Amino acid sequence: MTTHPTLDAIARYAGDGPGLDDAAVWSIEVHLENCADCRARLAGSTTDATRTLLDRVAAELDRGVAAGPAPARLRRPWSVLHQRWLVWALLPWLTMTAGVLGCAMLLQEVNPQWPSLVLLLAPLAPLPGVAVAWSRRADPAWELIAGTPSAGLTMLLRRTAAALAVVVPLLALIGIRTGDSLALLLLPCFACTAATVAIGGLVGVVRAAAGIGVVWAAAVVLPSVGTGHMSVVLRPGSVPVWALAAVALAAFTVTQADNYRRLSSRS
Amino acid sequence: MRSVSAAETAPTISPWAVQAEGLRVRVGRHLAVDGLDLSLGTGVHGLLGPNGAGKTTLMRALATVVKPADGRLQLLGQPVDGRGNLRLVRRGLGYLPQQFGFYPRFTVREFVEYLAWLKEMPGPAIPDAVQRAIDRVGLTEKADARMKTLSGGMLRRAGIAQAIVNSPEVVLLDEPTVGLDPEQRLDFRTLLRELGVDSCVLVSTHLVEDVVAACTDVILINRGKLVYQGTPDGLVAEGGPDDAGDSPAERGYSALLRRHRAEEVR
């Protein structure tokens, strides 16, 4: 059970403690720290002299704060700060990607009998962004960053995620409008991204992205457009295969971590 | 079965911050560093050599940015050939590359903060460490100026600030005095001496006078090979009155290079 100090003890404490020994003053102080009721009683017992002193101190403090320097600006979170250059580097490429996908969507609406151009181009959509995110030409501080402990696969994956964060919602929105299967839009997209990162560890990310783009265009896009029939690799039955490929390539990517630890002439 | 002695299983504690044995580093097909043996401890070490001697490639290898083609390289007692903890080693490194790239829209403070973050410094320690590093290179007044507004000398100083922000045990500075005016160079020499008290600082430069004034140790390389390692006084003593150069140190530098080239011809 909590024992509160008497009103008389609080009044004497407020009056600078006449008649209270050190132990009693200390005991009341400890109690006041934890008891709002007694703090209110103490406020009511404060003498006029103390109130005048407190008002004077408050006025002085207000004047000092008003005359002093402005409080330091709260710094932006690290994640926003450190991605800022990346936003500028990615912006033109992502704009171009959005433009190409938008054109594909319009063409598809004009010529509904054609194979879905959005579906054909979706796997390539994130590749320019991924290539730029890990290119020594795009990152001016490339060599500086390559010597830091954060450099490596984790950094590449973080930058890849930044590119995907724009491309995936865009593809989903376009897919909803065109009625294409979201699984067929996104799974090949994830698989090609994982393949770019995985092969990029061996030949460089830019070369890997370019190579995958050329192979995809030659093996899937051109035959589909030429024949007017969607390639077998983008038919609904291929969804489980793409899911498996995406997982396998993502696992293979992890094995390439060592190749991303140092600068390479391939980067 | 061969018995293993306690000495063989005991951890190896190296007195050297940097230790290279038979180090070879390639740039494309060119062997830029060719069988270099080097041991560096605490102090300021000046790396000298003519253009194309392999200074920048050596700095890159020591900064763990490029992988050596052959030989053994240990930094802070850890091998950096893939078996050691590269991440741990990099936390103890500070590196200013010759081609110092930066983000033009960042302020000096943001740039140094970003590098501190990449160096995995604890978040709460970063603001104070950044301010200290900026103050040490004399950029306090420009801390909130954008990088693109700085002069060449100021950019170099911002580069040095990011290199020392994590209080590294090994500091690698490639041509740090490029763009600095004479007064800034004198300040920089003082900074080097301060850093060398408890760190291993390797400074690559063409300015022999900087090395003599600020370094405890001189390393001269040519065609990727070690030509000389010793004190600045030793370098001065190598020169004769007929050797090329405006100062005794430059004459010593010229004499050593001349002899090394003559030996290579033989």
Image (spheres, coloured by chain):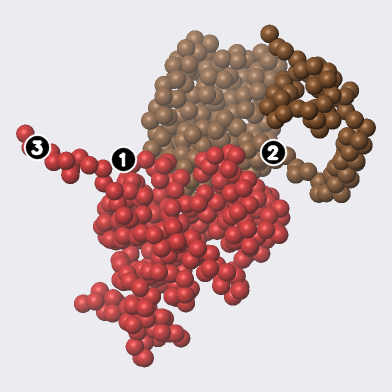
Chain colours: A brown, B red
Which residue was labeled with disc 3?
B3
Badge 3 sits on which subunit?
B
Which residue was labeled with disc 1?
B83
Which residue was labeled with disc 2?
A76
Residue found 26% across the figure and 56% down from its top: B21
> Where in the figure is residue B245, as x and y percent of width and height?
43, 85
**Amino acid, disc 3:** Ser
Name the element at disc 3: loop
Residue found 46% across the figure and 39% down from its top: A152
In the picture, which quadrant includes the N terminus of chain A? top right
The answer to whether residue B24 shows anywhere in this view is: no
> Where in the figure is residue A17, as x and y percent of width and height?
79, 30
Residue found 33% across the figure and 82% down from its top: B237
Badge 2 sits on which subunit?
A
**Amino acid, disc 2:** Arg
Quote the CA–CA distance across marks 1 and 2.
38 Å
